[in-house]
Image: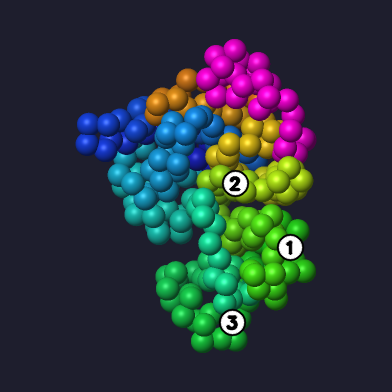
Amino acid sequence: MSVLSARGIGVRYGGVHALVDVQLTVQPGQLVGLIGPNGAGKTTFIDAVTGFTPHSGTVVLDDHDLTGAPPHLRARAGLVRTWQSGDLFDDLTVGENLAVAADPHTWWAGLARTLRGPARTSDQVPQALARVGLEALADTYPADLSQGQRKLVGVARALAGAPRVVCLDEPAAGLDTGESRLLGARLRAVVDSGTAMLLIDHDMGLVLGVCDHVVVLEFGRVVAAGPPDRIRDDPAVIAAYLGATAISGTGGAGR
């Protein structure tokens, strides 16, 4: 059984079709990549499946039909996302940033309890930090983190609520090759330990190096799907999205 099944996903903005009949599944223990040029509809797809934009089609998490559910109910069911900006609360420690996300009630209520402090950190927070290798940084403030560490905190924040699937929107943006390689290794370890992921990123070395399955979008439609080796060798995909230099093996983490 798929942990996430998105079928017939369509999004329209007036007369513009941003997504057309997109099919995508994520299996348990699987890291799925979603790639395509700028404007292909990748972020729109995550916006749709996580409930942040209206869509046609169905979204099922495990055996729960989330179609029509608002974002907070989808998140509570176990379908969460990260954002391209990845902003952290600079006045809170890393652990407190995660405690806000792990709160079982409303986001604002969790923030209020954290600010009233001292916050009581649940077991989920150290566990989430440990899964991305940042357990030693729980009491560190975001200003003292490297860009790569900030991105990993964003991933840990998504993990703090013990989700079933995490949708990652360009987590490697702004990272150098070494940071991207470390991020890829951490993401692979998280998936192998039991949390499925959907990854959007322009770092093709990262996507092709760590993903089990890759889906390619063009103008809101799926034009290719398969294991990384098949996508890497597809002439149409190479010409449209990757280019010879982008798949030469730079960036990312191998399996």
Disc 3 target residue: 119
Mark 2 vs mark 1: in front: 2
Check disc 1 and report its element: helix, strand or loop. Answer: loop
Extreme residue in the top direction: 235
Rendered location of residue 167, percent (x, y): 53, 46
Residue 190 visible in the shown view: yes
Above or below for 76 versus 28: below
Answer with mark 2 or mark 1, whichever residue precedes in sequence: 1
User: Distance from label 2 to label 1 (Cα)?
Assistant: 19 Å
**Which residue occupies 40% across, 26% down?**
219
Q: Which residues are magenta?
A: 229-255
Which disc is residue 134 wearing? 1
**Which residue occupies 42% across, 73% down?**
108
Disc 1, disc 3: CB below 8 Å?
Answer: no
Extreme residue in the left direction: 14
Q: Name the quadrant of the C terminus.
A: top right
Left or right relative to 142: residue 74? left
Check disc 2 and report its element: helix, strand or loop. Answer: loop
